[in-house]
Amino acid sequence: MERVMNRVLIEDPFKVDKHRAAKPLYAALVPDEIFKGSHFERRFVTPFGGVWEKLAYLAAKNGIGNAELQKRITGNIPEERLNRIAQVLRNLEHPAKGKKRVKPNWEEELAFVLEGKGQLIPTTVITDIYVEDESQKKSFAFEIKAPLPNSDQTKVSKEKVLKLYAMKPRKISNAFFVLPYNPYGKREDYGWSFPKRWFDMIEDDVVLIGQEFWDFLGGVGTYDLFIKEINKLGKKYKDRIYKEYLGIEPGDNVFNL
């Protein structure tokens, strides 16, 4: 968070004159304060992807056990399984002419892929975080994306997860597509359309969202503790953002640009 504050206050501050010169139409119609907020948001959200992974690493180290970021997992996949993975992704992305788009169904897709045989092809998958539970002799791979991922990101993650399950012999016990936070609240209310093109975000067991992910890594209560600590940290930085970036006292409703 200190890096974000340094960037918006020193390295890349919002400059009203520059904004008005670059976007005169927008500046004429919309208050500068709106774009000042957007300026901060972009510089906050973009680097946050790596933060989720680091937090997951810490949760896993204090919960399940061993953890590794950007783990390279190499194994052999029958050639026909690779072809079937490509077919699954193609069907989800491009519906057959005159037909409705295929809806994702993880169990059916995985069963279809695993029926494939053929020559073994060496394949490497780099997963966001790899975790080993030594007591249970199990290992897990997680593809962690922002809470509102785009379609291409989700497609790449689905391909990785399918490949991990397709390896023969399998190198991990389970692999998951993860959203570390649910801006919609309950899982059944998750409504962002792009990942729903590739996963059934409500029903697929291969998907973990918010609390179920953090408690899986660190044990029951990890998510609640995480939110509690973030709230403590948030009070400090909210006050700084109000005063140092927006130029107002907390509780005021007038910006001072």
Image (cartoon, rainbow, N blue to C red):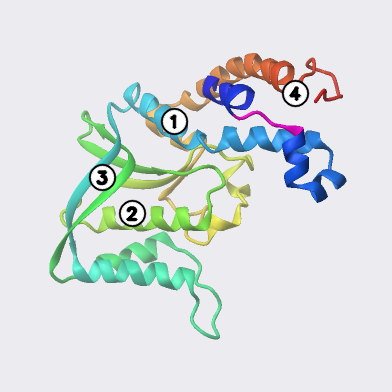
Please say if the residues under marks 2 and 4 sit with CB atoms less than 8 Å apart: no
Q: Residue at x 48, y 37 (%)?
A: 49
The amino acid type, in three-letter code, at marker 3 is Ser
Please say if the residues under marks 2 and 3 sit with CB atoms less than 8 Å apart: no
Q: Say if residue 115 shows up in the picture.
A: no
Q: Find the distance from the CA under tag 4 to the CA under tag 1.
A: 36 Å
Q: Residue at x 36, y 58 (%)?
A: 159
Q: Quadrant of the C terminus?
A: top right
**Label 1: which residue?**
215
Is 223 contained in the magenta span? no
**Label 4: which residue?**
246
* In this rendering, position of residue 205 left or right of residue 71: right
Q: Residues within 10 Å of mark 4 (few under 14, many from 20)?
A: some
The label nearer to you, 2 versus 4, is: 4
**Label 2: which residue?**
160
Q: Residues within 10 Å of mark 1 (few under 14, many from 20)?
A: some
Reply above or below: 193 against 24: below
Determine the secondary structure under disc 3: loop
Determine the secondary structure under disc 1: helix
Q: Say if residue 118 shows up in the picture.
A: yes
**Label 3: which residue?**
173
Reply above or below: 145 against 51: below
Q: Find the distance from the CA under tag 3 to the CA under tag 4.
A: 48 Å
Q: Between disc 2 and disc 4, whose residue precedes?
A: 2
Q: Which residues are magenta?
A: 12-16
Q: Between disc 4 and disc 1, whose residue precedes?
A: 1
Please say if the residues under marks 1 and 2 sit with CB atoms less than 8 Å apart: no
Q: Between disc 3 and disc 4, whose residue precedes?
A: 3
Q: Between disc 1 and disc 2, whose residue precedes?
A: 2
Q: Residue at x 13, y 64 (%)?
A: 120
